Amino acid sequence: MTDTRVPSAPGAAPPGGESLAQRVLRLALTERVVLLAVLLVVVVVWFRVLGDGGYLVAPYDVRYLGNALESMVPFALLAIAELFVIVSGRGGIDLSVGAIVSLAGMVFGLMVGEWGWPLLPSIVACVAVGGLLGAVNGALVAYLRFPALIATLATYYAYSSLALVSNANAPISTPPIVALHSLTRNVHLPLLPPVPLHVFTILVPCAVLAWVVLSRSTYGRSLYAVGTNDIAAGYATQPVTRTRFTAYVVSGLLSGVVALVTVAQFASARPDAGVVGNGMALPAITIAVLGGVAIQGGIGRVGGVVVAALLVTWLNAGMLLAFEGSEGSQYQLLALGLVLVLSALLNTLALRRYGRLA
Amino acid sequence: MTATTGQVDQAPPVTRRRPRVRAIEGQEVALIGVTGLLWLVLSLATDTFLTSGNLQNILFTVAPIALIGIGMTAVIVTAGIDVSVGSQAAVVMVVIALLVRDAGFAFLPALAVAVVSGLVLGALNGLLVAYGGIHPIIVTFGTLNIYRFVALQIFGSEQVAGVPGAFAPIGGGAEGRVFGVPVAWWLTLVLAAGMWCYMRFWATGRHLYAVGGDAFAARLAGVRVRRRQISAYVLTGACVGLAACVLIGSGGLVQQNVGAGLELRVIAAVVIGGTSIIGGRGTVLGTLLGALLVGTVTSAVTLLSWPTELTQLFIGGFILVAVGVDLLRERRRSAR
């Protein structure tokens, strides 16, 4: 029933005598981080040039780029969440991350803002709620074998509905919640522009942890094996079901962390935080695919995803300056869509040509 | 799946087996039962449910979802998905709203423009899926954004107000009804019946199932896989064009966020109707019933004066139950 064909055979060893141009092309197509780094430089230089030419409404300087990192944190974390889920294979995808952000954020808001719980237990509970909601997804997909797209679509509906009902569709912004805003203040470090505090306290630790888990732990190797070919992984005595289940739990935990971040950022627990507009799931999936995660599963790295998140953040920040009024946010939609389709085309091309992808 | 690939039985069966293609599937019977039960309970619990006004309202609000669902069924049967229909609808609606208001287009020309622009948007999706080698969900997530951008550009950062009632013949008002049933619903029924016959009796219609069952095997069997994929997305685009006319209905205001979230409601209706998301199985009849169930639930939550946000919780629950039942049947089928 499911398509168990592996996307490609192991890559034919590149012939020794390839020209420089071929080598550059191969590097750009197979080493996604290299390509993204080049694009990142291009974007930054391009907007600097536009700024010097007076085409931007405000300077696109280091201080602005540092501030823009604030909006990178949730999307980078959710893209890492999608990385885990998509790598787990069998059509893995998590449409419900935005709804989990809403619901866990509302639970956190109720705990801190209404019931007066101390901060630390509430933080732990909020992340745990995220993990629990992720576990529901994981149980549906891994144990009951629901198609991931449909299972997480259904839970997206359910969670976002519960988030709206939880406080009768009203945000919670009592004083204890507003006080949390200081957690996302800018910090001044030597040699660096002011950077939001939670880049260091949340994003960097989570990304490093994710990298360790995926690249340096037994679980990570098992996850890649399961995502590449779950039948083969089963014969190789990997715990297929449990590994896949855990990927969804991780996605839920990270969504719980993002819930904390958004509550602190907006100084308010909003019932539609993760689903308003296009929601958070779509940009997260876009960033993951741009970062070199193959939708078939088994392929993708944390480094690529983080650099992709940085690229999208600074591109969006630049476009806000390049247009007056709401035009900038409209062009962000165009850029997001084009980037998603083009990066997927690039993934296909790289797989066809070299049989592998980084 | 089994019904579509035309397998040859190895040994001659001892007893004559029932014909593989049934007029109505088990899931559809169950859906009729659930919807009927809901209607019964609701008409007993409230005195407003079983009124012609409310039923007309349900049918009219369900019509656009069911219309798009006709195309979406074909797409999902080919193992694809189209999440860009909401943005497609936004593009078509703003185009025809402006044409009707500023260029004075009449009903039929505007309808034609709507269908053609829907076709074009769908064709782009189809081409990218068939020739780009990209997973359909990625393609249509991308075009969801791109089409929304196009729509917003045409809007020019203001909503379109004062659209005249050129589409009143298929709108929700009194002139949009024949025999007391909304014309939009008649339109849906006719199209659905045509599509049902096509997917059941025409060779190319059966090929849709073959593509969804196993595209590689279908290609070896001589099915033009890419052409079938493109045709499914193009059909969806055309359906979106029609649905956009219904949504504009008797005119008024077209807002910039129009059509947002429509794709999820359509996919929910298709999946509740028993179409398998991994492709190869499903019928248009099921989709109609699924849409009707979604419409009934939405209406019920309003009439029972529960918080409207609960509607989504019920839809999510119905999706899980429908897919769960389908998985159970599938498991039993493959165990046999």
Image (cartoon, coloured by chain):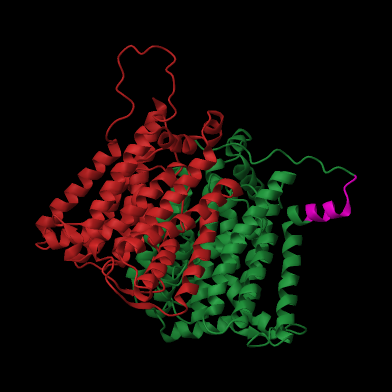
Which residue is located at x 63 percent, y 49 percent? Answer: A219
Which chain identifier belongs to the green chain? A
Relative image position of residue A249 (x, y in whole percent): 51, 55
Which residue is located at x 53 percent, y 65 percent? Answer: B146
Q: Is residue B95 magenta?
A: no
> Can the viewer see residue B304 in this picture?
no
B26 or B282: nearer the eye? B282
Q: Which residues are magenta?
A: A17-27
In the rendered structure, the answer to whether residue B159 lies left or right of residue A18 reads left
In the rendered structure, the answer to whether residue A120 lies left or right of residue A37 reads left
Relative image position of residue B51 (x, y in whole percent): 11, 60
Q: Quadrant of residue B100?
A: bottom left
Q: Is residue A140 above or below residue B57?
A: above
Which residue is located at x 41 percent, y 83 percent? Answer: A173
A56 or B244: nearer the eye? B244
Which chain identifier belongs to the red chain? B
Relative image position of residue A300 (x, y in whole percent): 66, 53
Which residue is located at x 44 percent, y 61 percent? Answer: B88
Q: Is residue A24 magenta?
A: yes
Q: Is residue A178 above or below residue B89?
A: below
A205 or A58: nearer the eye? A58
